[in-house]
Amino acid sequence: MKFAIPATIVALASAVQAVEQLPAGTIKNLVTFGDSYTDIVSVGDGGTAWPVYAAGYAHAQLFPFAKSGATCSNNITSRPFPSVFESQLPAYFSETKNGTLKLDAEETLYTLWIGTNDVGANALLTGSDNASIVDVVECTINWVKV
């Protein structure tokens, strides 16, 4: 466990370095999925949500799909909120299929911030669901595959 924080710092530093090496203007679109940490409508502290800040900083167009209270999948952690797999991804694919959302993959950054509702109170940590941490991690990996 003592290596978790240094490993996270190294991973973040590597990601920042990789993005810094991209020519300016390479990322033109930011598509976000997730829970309240990424929701731009229900900002808990009343400040600016990170996707709004990041899109503005990068001069990218923001396409937000994240919703407060979401889990990766309500089939794993049942909650009365729009999950990534049962709500957010279908909304995204509906918009791409009907042509209202046309994004060049080479110019688009996709993000997922999930886990707080999957493993927090009334979920894995309190034993309220039969899901495991492996199920939640697998769900987030499957998001990448979609």
Image (spheres, rainbow, N blue to C red):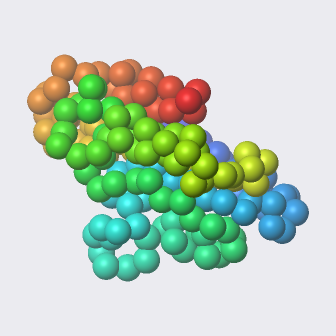
Residue 39 seen in the current view? yes
Residue at position x 57%, y 40% from top? 97
Q: How many badges with numbers are in the image?
A: 0
Quarter occupied by residue 1: top left
Residue at position x 81%, y 60% from top? 26
* Front-lying residue, 98 or 44: 98
Residue sticking out furthest to the front? 98
60 relative position to 92: left or right: right
Residue 8 seen in the current view? no
Q: Residue 78 at what x, y percent from top left?
A: 19, 33
Q: Residue 14 at what x, y percent from top left?
A: 72, 49
Q: Residue 117 at what x, y percent from top left?
A: 26, 44
Q: Residue 7 at what x, y percent from top left?
A: 59, 42
Residue at position x 69%, y 74% from top? 59
33 relative position to 44: left or right: right
Residue at position x 31%, y 79% from top? 46
26 relative position to 113: left or right: right
In the image, is residue 85 above or below residue 142? Answer: below
Point out the image quarter for the C terminus.
Answer: top right
* Front-lying residue, 92 or 6: 92
